[in-house]
Image: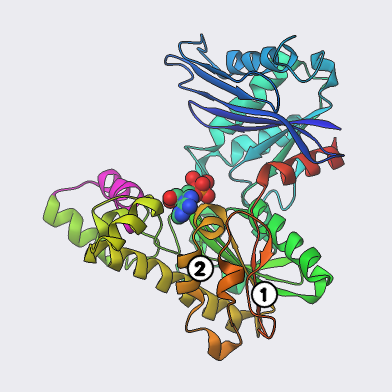
Amino acid sequence: MKVLVINAGSSSLKYQLLDTNSQEVLAKGLCERIGIDGKFTYKAPGKPTVDAADVAMPTHAEAIQAVLAALVDPLGGVISSMSEIDAVGHRVVHGGETFARSVRIDDRVMAALEENVPLAPLHNPANITGIKACTAVMGPGVPQVAVFDTAFHQTMPPVAYVYPLPYEYYQQDKVRRYGFHGTSHRYVTHRAADMLGKPIEALKLISCHLGNGSSIAAVSGGKSVDTSMGFTPLAGLPMGTRSGDLDAGVLEYLMSRHGMDIKEMVSVLNKKSGVLGVSGVSSDFRDLCAARDSGNDRVALALDMFNYGVKKYIGAYAAAMGGVDAIIFTAGVGENDADQRMAIASGLEFMGVKMDPDANAIRGKEAIISAIDSKVKVLLIPTNEELMIALDTAELA
Ligand code: ADP
């Protein structure tokens, strides 16, 4: 089956055309600056690449049209007509408590997506726009599926998702831990079971998605039982620019001292904090590693804080699950940064984690990076959210 995977943002749209039988990516690219001055990129193996500026894209509909035109282009295209696209899979950020799994989109689902907009006011409207643009351009006959970042975590028990606030805020306002990166955690934990040759039902896994945004999930028997992000992706680990967990008392103190309103304060927490805030140098781990190696102490502190945060979650989730069979590293930092992986795993020998430094000297490939006699296995698994979205879409379309 050929599935077009769409990840729509407010002014951007990432796309991939995948063949779900061969699991091959046939073409992929990005529409950026939608509604501004339209930038379009397209890549397909063995075909001429497109990298065009000033492409007329007043709305997401023109962006989808540009994608389809590139896919069927006689020179660079990979299909001969749009009818070869069997279905479209959309990444949707927030499914609230309504969606515990991926779903085929119909009017009822669209209404439920609209209802969940208050939970993700920046992201869900963009996802809805992407779905409407596909319907407008491709017609209502092409099946579309929504795959939610939050859905995988809907298996968490109340003890993990209820916040210690007046209970009415959960009942009336839906304030609770939802968790994100669910598609990634689901993908890598299933790959881990394959790599270990064990049924996922028999495994206790800790999945560390460490990228620009980072989250950790405790996955017991294939079900997410806890995760570090919360009501929003601002919770949990210190990230590239997000603070992660923080004493809420700091907010009032800083707002009054610096005359900030709540919007400015939250913007600091989302955009100026994390390893960027502490280091004062960058949110990008490549820059940080280089600066640390040239002797910058604040950068070293930022990286140490990040590793310390990951280590604490690993300990906490091993305790929450009553043990752990394997720890998974994935996403930009987890897949590429051998030093960070080593630093995180060091000191965990007491709980049966023993790394193999040679096996760990690897990037971006599935591998077991713990020693043969390590009681807890450590795995490097590149994430593939687009493939997971395409497979769900093929199943439901
Ligand atoms: P997101 O999808 O959340 O934007 P990614 O999963 O792509 O983020 O991760 C981006 C992060 O991965 C960046 O901080 C980047 O520096 C880091 N990264 C990518 N390659 C490497 C590398 N070779 N070494 C260290 N960090 C890397």
Farthest residue, direction front? 358
Who's the residue at 53% across and 56% down the image? 336
Q: Indicate the position of residue 232 as horizontal and vertical percent values.
A: 48, 53
Q: Is residue 217 left or right of residue 68?
A: left
Q: Amino acid at mark 1?
A: Ala
What label sits on residue 326 in the rendered view?
Answer: 1
Of label 1 and label 2, which has the lower sequence position?
Answer: 1
Say whether residue 212 is visible.
no
Spatial separation of the CA atoms under disc 1 and disc 2: 14 Å
Rendered view: 162 above or below 352 = above
- Report the predominant secondary structure element of the magenta stretch: helix
Q: Nearer the viewer, mark 1 or mark 2?
A: 2
Amino acid bearing label 2: Arg
Residue 321, quarter of picture? bottom right
**Direction from residue 141 to residue 340 in the image, left or right:** left
Position of residue 205 relative to residue 103, above or below, is below
Q: Which residue is mark 2?
A: 341
Q: Going 67% across and 51% down the picture, which residue do you hit?
A: 183
What is the x, y in percent for residue 347?
47, 84
Image x and y of residue 91, in percent: 64, 39
Quarter that holds the C terminus: top right
**Magenta-colored span:** 259-275
